[in-house]
């Protein structure tokens, strides 16, 4: 895939599923939390999964869904301690470091924009060592809205000035790409295999990549 890199000054990058393998989060919320919740409540694993699925659905696409503090209170579990138990599953997608280095060499502004809670962001940056490759790290919790809300992008622009027509957003969440499109983001790109242990997903109306190696050749020509 060849993007018009000469027309782009800023690149906004999602974290979970985009830069990092979503297998960690899927395993944590769908397997590890139900297991620990079942143990804590002395109920069956199937009962725990059913109860948690219902609670998850109620909070989908809200800041609470992404909040460590909310779920710690809601489930009476030490969420960060439980994340540490499976933190060995945190993994960077292929070619991410090379892509970030190529963006830097090309003089682009590089911003991590995630719905993840600040505590989750800190854990993952500690585990991956990626933080130094960004100009700015932004959690949606700092801005008070999830990325699924088009108003989020206005708040982000006030925090990190960028020209929307000269900005690329890369995300694996189609609802987030939809909100950015409604807001008027210049370029949108989907990551179509956020979880390496699951099948590739259709990207609907958006151009998509499986991994960032597909962008390196075009980007290197602008450096």
Image: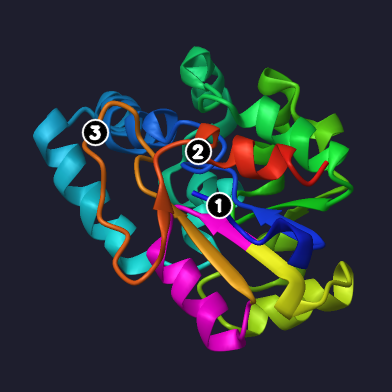
**x and y percent of residue 138 in the render?**
76, 55
Question: Which circle marks residue 2 in the picture?
Answer: 1
Which stretch did the figure color magenta?
Answer: 169-185
Closer to the eye: label 1 or 3: 1
**x and y percent of residue 22 in the render?**
42, 36
Secondary structure of the residue carrying tag 2 is helix
**Disc 2: which residue:** 214
The answer to whether residue 6 is above or below residue 110 is below
Q: Kindly tell me whether residue 39 is visible in this rendering.
A: yes
Among numbered discs 1 and 3, the one appearing first in the sequence: 1
Question: Which circle marks residue 198 in the picture?
Answer: 3
Quadrant location of the C terminus in the rendered image: top right
The answer to whether residue 206 is above or below residue 27 is below
Frontmost residue, 22 versus 78: 22
What is the C-alpha distance between the residues marked 1 and 2?
8 Å
Secondary structure of the residue carrying tag 3 is loop
Q: Residues within 10 Å of mark 1 (few under 14, many from 20)?
A: few
Q: Kindly tell me whether residue 146 is visible in this rendering.
A: no
Q: Is residue 176 covered in magenta?
A: yes
């Amino acid at each position: 895939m060849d993007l018009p890199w000469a027309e782009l000054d800023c690149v906004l990058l999602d974290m979970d599923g985009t830069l990092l393998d979503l297998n960690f989060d899927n395993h944590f919320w769908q397997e590890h939390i139900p297991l620990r919740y079942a143990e804590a409540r002395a109920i069956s694993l199937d009962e725990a999964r059913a109860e948690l699925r219902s609670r998850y659905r109620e909070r989908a696409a809200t800041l609470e869904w992404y909040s460590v503090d909310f779920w710690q209170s809601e489930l009476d579990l030490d969420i960060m301690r439980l994340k540490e138990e499976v933190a060995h599953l945190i993994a960077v997608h292929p070619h991410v470091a090379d892509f970030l280095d190529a963006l830097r060499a090309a003089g682009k502004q590089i911003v991590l924009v995630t719905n993840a809670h600040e505590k989750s962001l800190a854990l993952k940056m500690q585990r991956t060592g990626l933080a130094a490759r960004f100009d700015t790290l932004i959690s949606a919790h700092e801005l008070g809205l999830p990325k699924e809300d088009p108003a989020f992008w206005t708040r982000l622009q006030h925090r990190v000035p960028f020209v929307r027509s000269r900005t690329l957003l890369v995300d694996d969440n189609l609802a987030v790409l939809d909100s950015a499109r409604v807001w008027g983001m210049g370029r949108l790109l989907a990551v179509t295999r956020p979880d390496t242990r699951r099948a590739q997903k259709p990207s609907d109306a958006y151009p998509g990549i499986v991994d960032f190696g597909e962008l390196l050749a075009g980007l290197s020509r602008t450096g």
